[in-house]
Image (cartoon, rainbow, N blue to C red):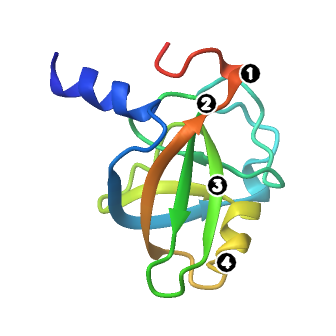
Amino acid sequence: MGALGLWLLLACAARGPVQSGKASWYGKELAGNPTASGEPFRPSRRTAAHRTLPFGTVVRVTRPDTGATVRVVINDRGPFVAGRIIDLSRRAARRIDMLEAGVVAVDVQVVGCKARYGRCGD
């Protein structure tokens, strides 16, 4: 099994490895636009964009400096800025108190899948 296959397998495990990096957020300016998964972007939902995790993957995003956490569902692709690993919806960003800062250090851990997306990894 290749590295990508192993990552996809871990993405739908009960617990996955922790990925550390920077998070940013996006909000109302993109509301209603289609995400990469096909559903409209809703800033009021706890969703996120990740470059490689399958749509429907549920991740826990933690700010190591404050301990604040939020669970989000991956439904989009991105971020496409060097050094960033996840883009959060406005609601998710508010939950971990990063709206003002804009970009913060986070740890991202896979914790499950949402059934409405089918099997994660498809």
Kindly indicate whether the residue at mark 4 contacts the one at mark 1 (C-beta within 8 angstroms): no
Percent across and percent down for residue 53 are 44, 35
Res 29 → quadrant? bottom right
Amino acid tagged 2 = Gly
Amino acid tagged 3 = Arg
Give the residue drawn at x 84%, y 55%: 44
The residue tagged 4 is 99
| Residue nearer the viewer, 86 or 79 | 86
Res 87 → quadrant? bottom right
SS label for mark 3? strand
Q: Which of marks 1 and 4 is in front?
A: 1
Q: With 76 as the anchor, is 89 left or right in this view? A: right
Q: In this view, does 105 lie above or below 101?
A: above
Give the residue drawn at x 53%, y 45%: 111
The residue tagged 1 is 116
The residue tagged 3 is 71
Quick one: label 1 or label 4, which is nearer the N terminus?
4
Give the residue drawn at x 71%, y 30%: 34
Res 107 → quadrant? bottom left
Q: Mark 1 and mark 4: span between their CA atoms?
A: 29 Å
Q: Is residue 5 above or below residue 32?
A: above
